[in-house]
Image (cartoon, rainbow, N blue to C red):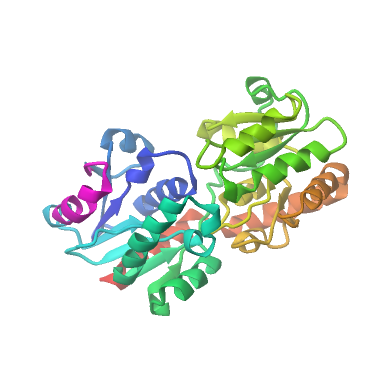
Amino acid sequence: MRIGIDAHHLNGKPQGSRTYLLQLIRALAQLIEDDDELRVFSFEPEATRQLVDGSHYRVFPRTAKIRLPFVVPVLELVHGLDVFHSQYIAPPLSFVPEVVTIHDVLFETHPELFEGAFSKRSRGLIRRSAKRARAVLTVSEFSRQAILETYRIPEERVIVTYDAVDHDRFRPLDPPPIELLKRYGLDRPFVLSVGRLEPRKNLERLIGAIARLDGDVTLALVGVSDFRYESILEKVDALPEATVKLLGAVPDEDLPGLYNLAEALAYPSLAEGFGMPVLEAMACGTPVVTTKRGALPEVGGDAVLYVDPLDEEAIAGGLTQILADTGLRATLRARGLARAPEFVWEDTARRTLSAYRQAL
């Protein structure tokens, strides 16, 4: 079986779908047998080759209006592919069975959290991709149910292949890399937040919650500015300088260290198809404050502290509990370290390979 994967997301901004693609390709490369072949298509094959092993080829142009309907089908024929795997949007015409990963349909179920134009465009393209694909992969049972309810496609075509975590990187570090504190200007205890700066992450309420805490605690925000981020920055600017630190997109190699050094991860999201930072924090033994929205309970189980995301005071209360109660911290750490190994990329890759064969 010759598998083609649209990996242009690897040349894009840091986000969960990029991590998924990177780790999936790495795991697939370790699993495929002699009679299988993996071909990776991206905008910058030389750069992509530095990230993952495999046979790399260029897909072009960057504009999807030309690439998807005209270039990708030709590449399928030229490369003799047996199956083609896309994320979210598959080509409208294909000469081989299509598999598409739809991480979530929050743009359908929670349109108020997205840009209007994005939601309208995505609804049409992703709906078409879901209905045409031989197999639709998604990363949680929550997302699977939402896809089934929204797109009305046969249940057997929608398959859960859970996100996972790289346990070689995300683990307790002894000693933790304290040099990162100086590098990022973190001179007092800090609560970590990881994710793009956009409405769905509920950062305005989180910033307000941090401002309510007694004691010297900093909120360290890791993530790039996305859409409708201006009000988040305004809220940061209104507080004393040390209250919130905007760290931006930190290098991949620094992130496990920041999890290890943090007092807690705060992830009060309003909606999630999975919630990868919650799993990364648990794998590092970092206590987590999050919500019961979307797929987050599937990830956190009983290993995290849940709060009401719409109640700023409740978020502050949850953080206060974790910061003050050493027994609770120890319990959450132990439960997180026990639960995180349930999510491994090899399992994700095995289920994905099975879906490819099912699609043939």
User: Residue 47: x and y, percent?
Assistant: 32, 33
Can you tell which quarter of the image residue 210 is in? top right
User: Residue 228: x and y, percent?
Assistant: 54, 42
Above or below, comparing residue 297 to residue 27 in the picture: below
Q: Which residues are magenta?
A: 58-74
User: Residue 313: x and y, percent?
Assistant: 81, 49
- In percent of the image, x 53 and y 54: which residue is there? 164
- Say which quadrant the C terminus sits in: bottom left
User: Residue 136: x and y, percent?
Assistant: 38, 67
- Say which quadrant the N terminus sits in: bottom left
Can you tell which quarter of the image residue 155 is in? bottom left
Name the dominant secondary structure of the magenta segment.
helix
Does the stretch in magenta take in 142? no
Left or right: residue 66 compared with residue 160: left
- In percent of the image, x 33 and y 57: which residue is there? 89
Left or right: residue 262 compared with residue 31: right
Any part of residue 285 in sight: no
Can you tell which quarter of the image residue 4 is in? bottom left
Front-lying residue, 349 or 87: 87
Above or below, comparing residue 149 to residue 267 in the picture: below
Left or right: residue 174 compared with residue 105: right
Front-lying residue, 3 or 265: 265
Any part of residue 56 in sight: yes
Above or below, comparing residue 31 to residue 192 in the picture: below
Disc count in the image? 0
Does the stretch in magenta take in 64? yes
- In percent of the image, x 29 and y 45: which residue is there? 54
Which residue is situated farthest in the front direction here?
116
Front-lying residue, 214 or 80: 214
